[in-house]
Amino acid sequence: MTISHPEAAEYGGRIGFGVSGPHATPLLSPAQTTRLLRTAFEGGIRLFDTAPSYGDGEAERRLGDALQDLPRNQYMLSTKVGHNRDPGGRLVRDFTPDGVRRSIDASLSRLRTSHVDWLFLHGPALEELTDPLLRMLEAEIKSGRILRLGVAGRGSEVEEALTTDLISLAMIPVNAGLRPEAVSTLERLRARGTQIIGIETLAPALRTRIAPGTAGGVFRLMRAAAMRSRPDPHVRMNIRDALTWALARNRADLALTTTSSLSHLNEILKAYETLSADA
Ligand SMILES: NC(=O)c1ccc[n+]([C@@H]2O[C@H](COP(=O)([O-])OP(=O)(O)OC[C@H]3O[C@@H](n4cnc5c(N)ncnc54)[C@H](OP(=O)(O)O)[C@@H]3O)[C@@H](O)[C@H]2O)c1
């Protein structure tokens, strides 16, 4: 398989692990999260994604704790800005320069690192991408606290944010059940050379109507009603085919995935190993 993403190639893989969902809740213990992250690292995964809004910092803390004794140049960290939690646990948007700088400070502290490799603006509206914000982010890149900037989202805000040269990564859904509008967005982004970090890559392989057997399954059922970009339910695949689809022809440069289960993680690693060997 051709590895097109320069950093992912350097780090040896095109799969990333997301520390989110049950990893930010008591559904999983910190020790279980650590075990999964260490197994992912040993299996060759080198990109770990999270966000300050996942459990109000809990996911970032778990990620920072789990990897802190590994050499920092052996893995990449990605996190986000723009969505925080208020004391009542509700999501609050904040794309002000001061708010974003405070968010970066807090993320670096929880992740126990001096820099994040990729920082994603979490669904910014066009009017939230102000000149003062972009100047502040440019200064953060110059200082080395952020290596690259991206945008994460599901709608027109992704393409709008990519009109600034500072932003070069897009974190968007990439799976065989995408609606035609989402396929068109993906094709346009690819045509302009944006690097794509795929989310919801396993969606066509997940059967949400069966009784959940894992913490991730429970979390998914709880969140199902809130999902805005439910993939076409008629598209069904196994895990390996879903990953193959997402990574084929560089639809995604890197596929982000997550799990609460060691056996599911091993299935993902095995699927990735066989699809890399086949390519
Ligand atoms: N999706 C979003 O809204 C979103 C938004 C922004 C960022 N992200 C990032 O993207 C990462 C990936 O999230 P995603 O939801 O897009 O991931 P996904 O990989 O498409 O789906 C993850 C789900 O798949 C299940 N799963 C994983 N391996 C499995 C297997 N072998 N067999 C059966 N089920 C399996 C997991 O549940 P089990 O625990 O049961 O394995 C988990 O609930 C997140 O962690 C986050 O960092 C996601």
Image (spheres, rainbow, N blue to C red):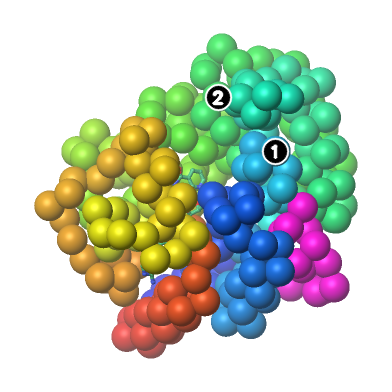
Q: Is residue 38 left or right of residue 175?
A: right
Q: Nearer the viewer, residue 89 or 44?
A: 89
**Residue, disc 2:** 124
The quadrant of the rendering that contains the N terminus is: bottom left
Report x, y in % for residue 179.
21, 40
Q: Nearer the viewer, residue 68 or 139?
A: 68
Magenta segment includes 73: yes
Q: Which mark is residue 56?
A: 1
Which residue shows up at 54% across the image and 45% down it? 169
Answer whether residue 183 is visible to the viewer in this image: no
Extent of the magenta region = 61-74
Q: Quadrant of residue 154?
A: top left
Vertical comparison of 66 with 20: above or below: below
Question: Marks 2 and 1, Cα distance to the nearest angstrom?
Answer: 19 Å
Vertical comparison of 201 with 98: above or below: below
Q: Is residue 205 left or right of residue 2?
A: left
Report x, y in % for residue 182.
28, 38
Q: Main secondary structure of the magenta part?
A: helix
Q: Mark 2 vs mark 1: which is more N-terminal? A: 1
